[in-house]
Amino acid sequence: MDCLIHPTYFPNIAHFVAMVKSDSICFEVCDNYQKQSYRNRTEIYGANGKLALSVPVSYSQKNRQLYKDVKIANEDDWQLQHLKSLQSAYSMSPFFEFYIDDLMSLFETKFDFILDLNLKCFEILQDSLQLELNVSESTVFEKDALNKTDFRPLAKRNYQASNLEYYTQVFTEKHGFIPNLSILDLIFNEGPNTELYLTRQSLD
C-alpha cells in the first residue's frame, strides 16, 4: 500500500499507524493550508486530561496560502511553553528520559515555516524509533489521490480513531485511557514497544 498523507506537528498515533503499514509514504506539501487541523497542533495527556499544544502561525483565511508558505508566529515563546508542557505531562513516564534528548533540537531551533517544522519533526521521530520508511514529497496537488491510499483526512481534528488498543498512560487512573494522542504519548509510555504496537493496529 502506498499512502498520501499530511505532515503534521508530532503526528497522532493513527497517523503513524497509516505510515508504518504503508509500503511508501508521500507527504502532501502542495495543498492549501487549512485551519483547525493537526498541521499546527498536537494533543498530549496532561494532569487534567487531554491538552492541546498549538504552534502559532501567521495565516489569514481571506488570502489562501499554500501549506508550504505559512509562517510560524515566533513572537510568542511557544517552543519553551511546549517543552514545559511535555516535561510536566511525561517526566514520570517510563521512557521520557530515554527519548527527550532526541527531541530537544525541535525546541531549540527557530523554524520559519510550519511545514519545515513538521518535516523535521517527522525525521527526528523516525530516527528515534529507528523506523525504515520510504518517504517522498508530492510535486503537484491531487484532489483525488492517484494510485495511493488517501490518508489526508487524518489531519482533520474531528477524525475518530476509536479502535486503537489500550496501553498504560501516566494519568490513566485519574482520567482513563485517551486514544489517538500524539505519538509522543505512546513513545514516552511504551518506548521500544512503540513500533510493535503500531503494527498491531488497524484504522477504521
Image (spheres, rainbow, N blue to C red):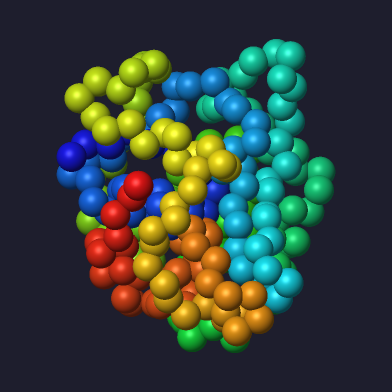
Across and down, in percent, residue 154 comes to 45, 41
- The residue most toward the top is 63
Left or right for 160, reference 127: right
Across and down, in percent, residue 76 comes to 81, 48
- For the residue pair 166 and 43, the one nearer the viewer reads as 166
**Residue found at x 31% / y 69%:** 197
Q: Can residue 65 be seen in this view?
A: yes
When the figure is inspected, residue 10 is found, relative to residue 38, above or below; the finding is below
- For the residue pair 72 and 146, the one nearer the viewer reads as 146
Q: Is residue 118 visible?
A: no
- Classify residue 199 by image quadrant: bottom left
When the figure is inspected, residue 153 is found, relative to residue 175, above or below; the finding is above
Across and down, in percent, residue 128 comes to 38, 66
**Residue found at x 57% / y 42%:** 157
Left or right for 7, reference 194: right
Across and down, in percent, residue 17 comes to 33, 54
Left or right for 171, reference 183: right
